[in-house]
Image: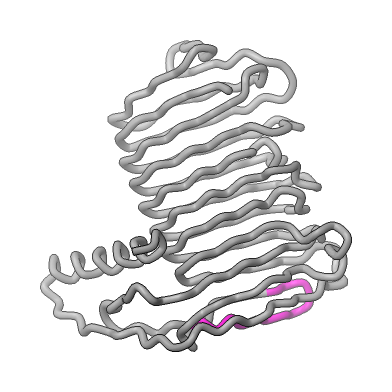
Amino acid sequence: MSRNRTLLALAALALATLACSINIDLPKHNVITGPTQTDEIQIPAPDVPVANLSLNFAAGELKISSIAEAISSNFLVSGAASYNTPDFKPEIEINEENIRLATGDLQIQGIPNLTDNLVNRWDLQLGRQPMNLKINAGAYEGDLDLGGLALKSLDITDGAADVRLRFSTPNLTEMDSLRYQTGASNVRLTGLANANFTSLIFRSGAGNYRLDFSGELQRDGVVTIESGFSQVVIIVPEGVSAKVIVGGGFMNTNASDGWTKQGDFYILAGSGPTLTINVDIGAGDLTLQTK
């Protein structure tokens, strides 16, 4: 069973468990599949200063990267979507600066009877037009490289997910806010200094989370991390000024060489802009590392 199929199965199991706990007999729903189809996706860059792009992805595999610079001025989104159930056919809505690309509504009554052959894959490239990007996703596997874009803000909400998000190169504009909210997931965020954010808020349920602030830190940034029962790893490169403020309940904190404990603070000495990171974990482990 592929990783995204496992995530879908876990989501179905959670629904089944909830139904049993409150003694409700929910009906089964079979997801009907057919031949895999592939739709080309081409959304022209709108003639506006800043675009608002919303990606609504139900479940499956989502890949995002940047369009080659030579053609980035022509398109806001370019790529393809492959699916084998009509309900996953992508839909595009354009209203001036507001653009919405969404997985077709998969109407499920009761607990889904999911099979190994369900296909839903998006492979998208985004242009360099300044934009506010919002991603809403369910149970999925994500490979998201947002380096080299011009993101004014980034807002991601997902469910049971296995996601690798990275800024492989610097964001081309100042990002006012980066928000990530997830359920029971495995999420790795790398190159976060390249995001060029002012505020980063990461909220999660149970899971494993890795936030790597490598890259070029151009200005001070404030980070808030709130998590349930989880394992959280924070990585800050040597030479970067950082302060981690620890709160929460039953949390065990481990700090590698370079970090100095001062009361409830952990300090990493450095120069230039400063990262201030507030961490609140209900229960679990917090690991502070350098690189």
Report the label total: 0
Task: Specify whether residue 92 is painted magenta.
Answer: yes
Q: Is residue 162 above or below residue 35?
A: above
Color theme of the render: one colour
Q: Nearer the viewer, residue 65 or 276?
A: 65
Image point 53% across, 49% down: which residue?
A: 164
Q: Is residue 146 left or right of residue 49?
A: left
Q: Residue pushed farthest left?
A: 23
Q: Is residue 196 above or below residue 184?
A: above
Per the picture, the main secondary structure of the magenta-coloured stretch is: strand
Q: Nearer the viewer, residue 168 or 24?
A: 168
Residue range (magenta): 88-99
Image point 77% across, 66% down: which residue?
A: 51
Task: Specify whether residue 148 is painted magenta.
Answer: no
The image shows residue 162 at horizontal and vertical percentages of 44, 54
Q: Is residue 288 above or below residue 144?
A: above
Q: Is residue 216 above or below residue 9?
A: above
The image shows residue 284 at horizontal and vertical percentages of 31, 34
Image point 76% across, 32% down: which residue?
A: 218
Image point 41% across, 63% down: which residue?
A: 4
In the rendered image, which quarter contains the N terminus?
bottom left
The image shows residue 59 at horizontal and vertical percentages of 45, 69
Q: Nearer the viewer, residue 112 or 223?
A: 112
The image quarter containing residue 54 is bottom right
In the rendered image, which quarter contains the C terminus?
top right
Q: Is residue 208 left or right of residue 214?
A: left
The image shows residue 5 at horizontal and vertical percentages of 37, 66
The image quarter containing residue 268 is top right
Q: Is residue 151 left or right of residue 287?
A: right
